[in-house]
Image: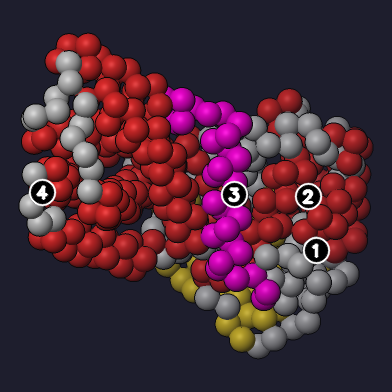
Amino acid sequence: MPNSGSNSAVAVWSVLRKECRTEWRTRYGLNAALLFAVTSLTAVSFAAGRLGNRTDIMAALFWIVLLFATLASMSHAFVREVESRTMLLLRLVATPTEIAVGKLLFNLLFLCVIEAVTVPLFMVLMGAPPVRWGQFLAVLGLGTVSLAASSTLVGAVIAQTRGRGALFAGVSLPLLLPVLAAAVGGTREMWAANSVAPSLKLLGAYAVALLAASLLLYDHLWED
Amino acid sequence: MSAASLRLAGNDIAHRFGPRVAVRPVSFDVSAPGVVAVTGENGSGKSTLLRILCGLLRPSRGECVFEVDGCAVEPRRRRLFTGLATPELSFYEEFSAAENLAFAAETRGLPNAANAVRLALEQVGLTPRADDRVSAFSSGMKQRLRLAFAILHEPPVIMLDEPGSHLDDAGRAVVEHIVQTYGPRALVLIATNEPREMALAEQRIELSGRGLERTA
């Protein structure tokens, strides 16, 4: 048969490349996310100055900036396909799991690019105390995976519903709260020179659970 | 392309969207090679039936049989054996025609994607505009691109939903050429009410009802 050679890794890679190319050509999500990150950090910096001794507030601010900078763009990964009526094209060339995993990888990449700009900017503008890089990157990495997995899953589920915008906020909230709580707690403990192990365990378990649930659910998405 | 022993059958297939009847019960049994017209009044469910046959939609009632070499193909794998051109199919406007087809070919895992894209564009007469963005395409050119998408991977089943819509005489000749080329080696289904397209078919599946009726 003509397509028997098709395999999932090739399809996922192709979807990922398509997402990157679309984002590079339109730059809608990237520009909006970077603009939000830079303006919000600059505004806080002007208003409150350097927050070097308030590591609790800094930890919360760091994750809030990351969350809001990226969430709107990541949720649009599927919505854009529905609104531009290209979802049918995707469904004809790949399985729901291949599509979703390709988009999940793109969301991870997208978050990494935003973090590459946001993290140094945050450290400089907020006057953050020295970072224990191993712990910081572990919290950041697991938080990033959890954020990307939850926003991809919610985006996929709500893509073909009416009132997507409102639904996204409602469905995302319970999924994102544990991620944010653990990530903020881990970042705060890292700056306070305490153990981040409990936060890492929670983030790791949550990321694994989200990814496993996603992989189980994706193949049943969009079944009419 | 291999058309060996491909059978497509519907056993009392019907579908409804909530209270609206989309497809009234219909039964048929067709096999490759051949050209089959799916006809019926507006709203009788021609497009819906094609979506059911290629596995995108699960019928509310009845059974769809899709067999290749005597083995049943489950709905989620039918897309591998099917090329669908329908007005509902849209392409990435920020990509060129060739890029859209290349994405489809690569995602499907075609071994020589570039060659498949070139051949498909040639067959629908879009080679001179291959590198133009789809956003600059007319309705007729987008329809030609849909036809190219349907034949890109040389599937054993080609489903053409209103293939002549938006096309000029040259475009309709492309449709006829595709049907005449693939008809002898694949199963070509044409959902249409155009007499010129119906004349291309050897068999016919007639759908009843207008799809405008509601049931309690």
Q: Residue at x 16, y 63 (%)?
A: A201
The residues tagged by marks 4 and 1 sit, at their Cα atoms, a distance apart of: 56 Å
Mark 3 and mark 2, same subunit? Answer: no
Residue that label 2 marks: B148
Image depth: mark 4 or mark 1 in front = 4
Circle 1 packing at 10 Å, graded few (<14), some (14-19), many (20+), is few
Q: Which mark is residue A193?
A: 4
Q: Callout 1: residue from which chain?
A: B
Q: Secondary structure at mark 4?
A: loop
Residue that label 3 marks: A17
- Give the residue type that dot 4 points to: Ala
The residues tagged by marks 2 and 1 sit, at their Cα atoms, a distance apart of: 16 Å
Residue B27 in the image: above or below residue B121: below
Mark 3 and mark 1, same subunit? Answer: no
Q: Position of residue A152 (x, y in %)?
A: 36, 49
Q: Callout 3: residue from which chain?
A: A
